Amino acid sequence: MPVTLFYIMWNKMSQIRDECPVLSKKIDNIEMQLLNKDNPIALDYIISRDSTVLKNSKKRSRKEQAYRDKLTVKLKNAVMFYIVKTRILKRIPNFNEILNMAINKKKREMQAARRK
């Protein structure tokens, strides 16, 4: 599935935000919505090829680079899968969930006692 990516350099984005307070406020609101989710894990699919960021980077063919990018995304997906799975397994239930579990257990016990 082909994807088109447009980007703005950080200093240009800062300049735009300084000139337009409405846009700046909307961007801040979106950032807060994304950060205040129950599971605020953001997958970063931005793969940088900037020579100032990557040290000792080699010049690769387009096909080879696309293959490496695909592997990088697969690796990130695998890591995130296990992070989320571990968080779910180690999650401590809140009071309402404990209360609901106790109520449901008591209901099942009462229904089992009626059947006997």
Image: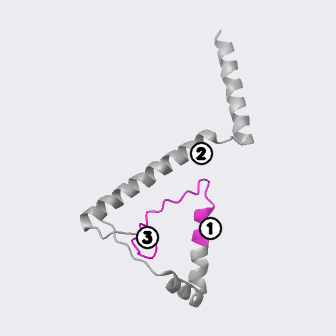
Front residue of this view, candidates 61 and 97: 61
Q: Is residue 89 magenta?
A: no
Mark 3: secondary structure:
loop
What residue would you read off at disc 2? 87
User: Residue 32 got which mark?
Assistant: 1
- x, y percentage for residue 43? 49, 59
| Quarter placement of the N terminus | bottom left
What's under tag 2, amino acid-wise? Answer: Arg
For the magenta stretch, what is the residue range? 29-55
Q: Residue at point 42% right, 77% down?
A: 7
| Quarter placement of the C terminus | top right
Between marks 2 and 1 in the image, the one whose residue lies nearer the viewer: 2
Q: Residue furthest bottom?
A: 19
> Is the residue under label 1 in contact with that under label 2 (CB below 8 Å)?
no
Question: Does any portion of residue 109 appear in the rendered image?
Answer: yes
Of the two numbered discs 2 and 1 on the same chain, state the one appearing first in sequence: 1
Is 86 above or below relative to 63? Answer: above
What residue would you read off at disc 3? 55
Q: Quadrant of residue 96?
A: top right
- Gap in angstroms between the C-alphas marked 3 and 1: 33 Å
- Gap in angstroms between the C-alphas marked 2 and 1: 22 Å
Q: Residue at point 68% right, 19% down?
A: 109
Mark 2: secondary structure:
helix
